[in-house]
Image: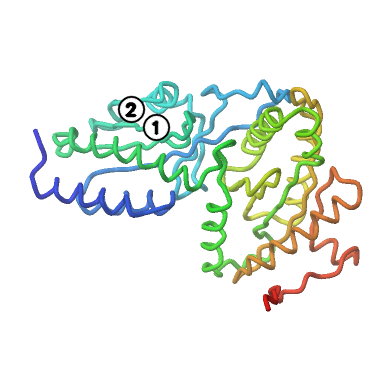
Amino acid sequence: MMMDKGKETQLWAAMAKLTRIDNERELFEELKVSLGVIYNNLDLVFFKIHFKRNDNLAAENFSRDKTNIILVSDYFDPSMQARLLSEDSCLSSCYSQKKTVKCTAKDSNHLVYVFPLCYEKEVLFLLSVALSDKEAEYSSSLFNFFKIFMNYFKVICSNERDFLTGMYNRRAFNRVINNLEIHPEKTNSEKTDYLLIIDIDFFKSINDNYGHMIGDEVLILFSRILRENIRTTDVAFRTGGEEFIIITSELSAEGMERKCERLRKIIEQTKFPQVHTLTISGGFSRLEYPLDTFHVLKKADAALYYAKDHGRNQIFSYESLVENKMILPVTQLAEIIDVW
């Protein structure tokens, strides 16, 4: 049975609205809102794919097998209980096949479609759509709608994802950080958010000595290690060349230091093909709200350059360096460039 003309008109009007959006989060939000208006009993959940830590420290053995994947229960609520992908046969099947899967919900007779949201052959999210008995009658039009949505998601990814590594890019970083700028409500003094900048040490020499193809392979493997060693609530970006940024939330200063040292050791102990060993230098700073993006980047950058200038293969806290009078505080005044 085809859906009534009124709902079908609303459905394609919703698609027209979606295709005017140019970023991932707004796209997901608008989809939930628009379809929620059209259907009373349509349940949409975006499951984020998150790699769990791989104890095998040989980078080339990184596994994308479904037993190595954790599902974040909901894109919009990462604090929810995460679980292994392999625990849900419907989601697991969709991930493995990279194809839409149709099944029946365990706790009801509702029809469930799971759509893989992919970029460059990698599944980034699984979109679960549960239809009530009434909406199941109109599943054909909805199915075509979501096929178009899946294709448009790839367009969004080309805007917000780094082509080489699949990580969020500088454009996505600007979106995320700008969103933080206008949400100054965080006041927890014991746990806070941080911005961490990481550079791969002597990366230019890898390109010079082994060639850019090996350099690209190192970046791909390095990005995978980052992704499997951050929390589900953290967000990682490749912002250019060998520079990466991680925004992390709700950590104590000691917890952030432990997190950075653990990541540094994992990179140092990992065996990379051809180059064998790799180290990183980094610097991090607290995010103070209301957020001044320019200022926090300058602070984290100051800590990063201190690490580089004092031996590399280390990560420093900007606040600790200032407190111990190892660097001067970074001014909060924006730089002024005289163009005359």
Q: Is residue 188 above or below residue 27?
A: below
Q: Nearer the viewer, residue 206 or 221?
A: 206
Residue 273 - label: none
Is disc 2 in contact with disc 1, using a CB cutoff of under 8 Å? Answer: yes
Residue 100 - label: 2
Q: Position of residue 103 (x, y in %)?
A: 29, 25
Residue at horizontal 53%, vertical 33%?
Answer: 70
Q: Residues within 10 Å of mark 2 (few under 14, many from 20)?
A: many
Residue at horizontal 90%, vertical 64%?
Answer: 324
Residue at horizontal 66%, vertical 32%?
Answer: 216
Q: Amino acid at mark 2?
A: Thr
Q: Amino acid at mark 1?
A: Pro
The secondary structure type at the circle numbered 1 is strand
Taking the image as shown, residue 43 lies to the left or right of residue 216, namely left
Q: Is residue 50 above or below residue 64?
A: below
Which badge, 2 or 1, comes first in the chain's sequence?
2
Give the image's coloring scheme.
rainbow
Q: Is residue 270 above or below residue 169?
A: above
Residue 116 - label: 1
Q: Nearer the viewer, residue 135 or 237?
A: 237
Q: Nearer the viewer, residue 138 or 72?
A: 138
